[in-house]
Structure formats: C-alpha cells, structure tokens
C-alpha cells in the first residue's frame, strides 16, 4: 500500500496494489457467461419449431407458435373456477369505481390490440379436453 498524488498534492489517496491479479481472475470467473448445457430432445424440438415458425409483423413485433405437447394430459374442467374468479373481480370493482374504470380501459386496450376476443358459441361447445378457461384475477 502506498500514497498516490492524483490531485496536485491535496489530500493524498491511498491505493492498494497487491492482490489485483487475484481479484481480476475472480471477477472474470464470476462474470463469465454460463456454458451452454446440452438441450434435451424436447427442448431442441421447441428451439427448432421456434426457428421455423416465428414471424415479425410490420410493427416489429414477433409472432411465435406455442409449442404444444401432442399427447398431453387433459387440463380438466376450468369454466366454473373462471366464472367464480370473474364474479369475484366484478364485486371488488363495484366497490372501487376508479379501479373499475382503469380495468375497463385496460381490457378495451387488449380488445383493440387483438389480444382479447369474444368467445364464439361454436367454440364454447367444444369438449372439455379441447378448451381451457384462464381464471381471471
């Protein structure tokens, strides 16, 4: 350790000069990017599907197909829980008109952007294992 004159003689600054090599080595090891682990066959298939199916819109957004497992277990009946959640939310919003207004504006934004669409009755008649209602919170 020694003093270094870095500001024209005013207030000398102490500097530590030992251990720099060790500290840099440790720093680079800690900051090193993790090595790529081998992908499972399923992960490799998802990566390949992404590479083959993604597109980019004129606005610059990426559109990606969801990677569904072909032989999945049925998700089960979800409509009753989804209805319970939306009714609970409606009761909560009735008690807070400001939140209700914000909620409706946000929902309308999703509709305007095409992220939210009304369920058509033809889809509502699908078997339970072919549809899933996302419970709202």
Image (cartoon, rainbow, N blue to C red):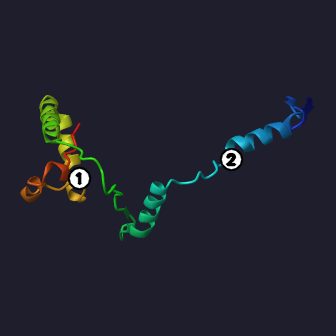
Residue nearer the viewer, 34 or 136: 34
Within 10 angstroms of label 1, few (less than 14), some, or many (20 or more) residues? Answer: few
Q: Position of residue 92 (x, y in %)?
A: 16, 30
Across the whole image, how many numbered discs are drawn on residues? 2
Q: Position of residue 39 (x, y in %)?
A: 53, 54
Which residue is rendered at x = 10% and y = 57% of the image? Answer: 120
**What mark, if any, has residue 72 been given in the picture?**
none
The Cα atoms of the two marked residues, 2 and 1, are separated by 42 Å
Q: Position of residue 112 (x, y in %)?
A: 21, 58
Image position of 126 (left or right of 24): left
For label 1, the residue is 109
Compare marks 2 and 1 and give the one earlier in the sequence. 2
104 lies above or below 95: below
Q: Position of residue 60 (x, y in %)?
A: 40, 66
Residue nearer the viewer, 95 or 57: 57
Within 10 angstroms of label 2, few (less than 14), some, or many (20 or more) residues? Answer: few
For label 2, the residue is 32
115 lies above or below 27: below
56 lies above or below 30: below
Which image quarter: residue 10? top right
Which residue is rendered at x = 17% and y = 37% of the image? Answer: 100
Residue nearer the viewer, 133 or 113: 133
Q: Is residue 9 visible?
A: yes
* Secondary structure at numbered mark 2: loop
Residue nearer the viewer, 62 or 74: 74
The nearer-to-camera label among 2 and 1 is 2
Which of the image's four quarters has the N terminus? top right
Which residue is rendered at x = 90% and y = 35% of the image? Answer: 5
* Secondary structure at numbered mark 1: helix
Image position of 24 (left or right of 91): right
């Amino acid at each position: 350790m020694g003093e270094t004159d870095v500001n024209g003689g005013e207030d000398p600054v102490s500097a530590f000069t030992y251990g720099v090599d060790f500290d840099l080595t440790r720093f680079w090891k800690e900051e090193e990017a993790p090595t790529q682990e081998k992908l499972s066959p399923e992960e490799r298939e998802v990566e390949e599907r992404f590479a083959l199916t993604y597109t980019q819109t004129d606005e610059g957004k990426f559109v990606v197909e969801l990677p569904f497992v072909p032989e999945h277990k049925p998700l089960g009946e979800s409509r009753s829980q989804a209805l319970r959640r939306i009714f609970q939310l409606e009761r909560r919003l009735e008690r807070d008109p400001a939140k209700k207004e914000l909620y409706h504006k946000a929902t309308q934004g999703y509709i305007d952007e095409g992220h939210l669409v009304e369920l058509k009755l033809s889809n509502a008649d699908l078997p339970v294992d072919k549809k899933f209602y996302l419970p709202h919170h």
